[in-house]
Amino acid sequence: MPPVLVSAVAGHVNGVWTAAAPRPHPQVTLMHTHIRKFVRRLRARGIDISTGEHLDALAALQHVPWLDRAAFREALRTTLVKRADLTPVFDEEFARYFAQGGQEPSRARTRRADVPG
């Protein structure tokens, strides 16, 4: 099960003292960043993903073990891909993105042939 720990932090925002607010665990924040980047890549490949679907994916990941690659992939695929013909695109991007540990590939390797460069 992914970490769901929170810590409370008080602060001064726009001249107003704020009460303690929950702050997500660093691993959760990092995972959200990776999923945001992954969704961006899927959108660039032509998969329409709404903000709601993105949020649904994040919610689904709270219910699967992050280290179970198959369950993790299925949770994302189920929430992000709505057309069967786009499943291969998702699978290709998932394999690329998560095989690289969530690192953005170099621009030279991902440049499309139809984009002048």
Image (spheres, rainbow, N blue to C red):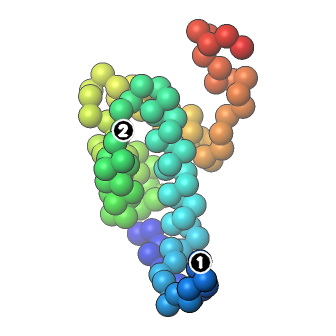
Q: Residue at x 49, y 50 (%)?
A: 35
Q: Amino acid at mark 1?
A: Asn
Q: Quadrant of residue 116?
A: top right
* Image marks 1 and 2: residues in contact by CB distance under 8 Å: no
Q: Residue at x 26, y 28 (%)?
A: 83
Locate the N terminus by quadrant.
bottom left
Q: Residue at x 56, y 89 (%)?
A: 17
Number of numbered discs visible in the structure rendering: 2
In the picture shown, does residue 51 fall above or below 67?
above
Location of mark 2 (residue): 49
Is any part of residue 3 visible from this angle?
A: yes
Query: Which one is earlier in the sequence, the residue at label 1 or at label 2?
Result: 1
Q: Nearer the viewer, residue 18 or 104?
A: 18
Location of mark 1 (residue): 14
In this picture, residue 16 sits left or right of residue 58: right
Residue 74 lies, in percent from the top left, at 34, 45
Q: Residue at x 50, y 48 (%)?
A: 36
Q: Nearer the viewer, residue 21 or 86?
A: 21
In the picture shown, does residue 26 fall above or below 66?
below
Residue 20 lies, in percent from the top left, at 50, 89
Number of other residues with Cα within 10 Å of mark 1, as a class: few under 14, some 14 to 19, many 20 or more: few
Q: Amino acid at mark 2?
A: Ile
Residue 22 lies, in percent from the top left, at 47, 81
Locate the C terminus by quadrant.
top right
Determine the residue located farthest toward the front in the rendered image.
Answer: 15
In this picture, residue 77 sits left or right of residue 27: left
Number of other residues with Cα within 10 Å of mark 2, as a class: few under 14, some 14 to 19, many 20 or more: some
Q: Which mark is residue 75?
A: none
Q: Quadrant of residue 104?
A: top right
